[in-house]
Amino acid sequence: MMEHLQSAMERFKAQRGTAYAPPKPDPAASVSPTTIVYSRSKPVFIHEEVLRRRRILTRHDSPFADAYKILRTQVLHRLRENDWNMLGITSPRDGAGKTLTAINLAIAMATEPNQTVLLVDADLRAPRVHETLELERKAGLTEYLLDGVPIEEMLLYPGLGRLIVLPGGRGTEQSAELLASPRMAALGKELKHRYESRIVIFDLPPVLGRADVLAFSPQLDALLLVVEDGKTSEADLQQTLHVLKGGTAVLGTVLNKVGYDQLNLSKVRRAVAANHGWTG
């Protein structure tokens, strides 16, 4: 399965070439970017047992921490060499583990010295970041876009490095329209430019069957695809790459849901060397 997925990615990269500049958003001139006050982020406590049970990187080393550190290093290198800071995490279809990957990658990056990370739950139809962290659902990005609730009233500080979380809020069927709205474009511009040292990671919906990623991708610098070992088909991956072709840069893939005892560090490094991220 992984050989087929790697082959598909290699053909995709060969078609696109190496020179690429992602398209830039064209925010409506009538919409002023909001000014976000991060000092008002609400501290939330996540018990260590929750982190372990949910397979989230803890304040101490986890069995799978090395894999995420390797992925972090590769992703940060690509972002920094291109002066990028807006990264989307998606998958071909539901169930591949994109939300957990987004959370763990954000935590891994936020433990880097002088690196701040904002994790945004942008899967507005089915937001899951708060569920994965076992936090009470409160107002989030949907409430900002639909109801005008100030962003600074929603930001959470979970005490995991220099990580701030913007939850998704309530689910909505208007997800694609909201992500393509002038208000979201203004927010994206604010998030991208306000703090130079901050990386913004968006947990996005799956690509296939929904318009959300295509609607929002002009605001992103790059995408990371999460594929599920033994489940994601080559046909789905090929279709996903075809949909994304000519748009936002795809950094690589993360092979997810592989037992840690089935993969050793040398295999992880080989995957990274082939420009594919991996998590177990």
Image (tube, rainbow, N blue to C red):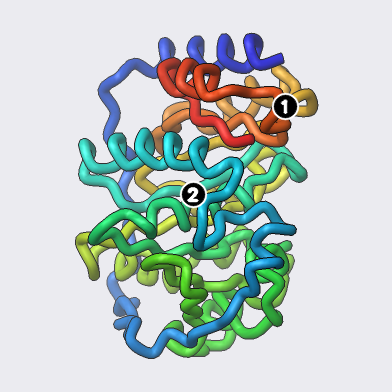
Determine whether 130 is above or below 82 in the image.
Answer: below
Q: What residue type is disc 2 on?
A: Leu
Placement of the N terminus among the 4 image quadrants: top right
Q: Nearer the viewer, residue 28 or 238?
A: 238
Question: Measuring 47% from the left and 57% from the top, which residue is drawn there?
Answer: 107
Find residue 72 and report its horizontal and vertical position in percent.
Answer: 41, 42
Asked if residue 238 can be seen in this view, the reply is yes
* C-alpha separation, residue under disc 1 versus residue under disc 2: 18 Å
Q: What residue type is disc 1 on?
A: Asp
Placement of the C terminus among the 4 image quadrants: top right
Find residue 270 and report its horizontal and vertical position in percent.
Answer: 48, 16
Regarding mark 1 in the picture, which secondary structure is present there?
A: loop
Q: Is residue 77 left or right of residue 139?
A: left
Q: Is residue 100 left or right of residue 107?
A: right
Question: Measuring 70% from the left and 81% from the top, which residue is drawn there?
Answer: 136
Count of labels shown? Answer: 2
* Residue 26, label in figure: none
User: Residue beneath label 1, please?
Assistant: 229
User: Residue beneath label 2, please?
Assistant: 105
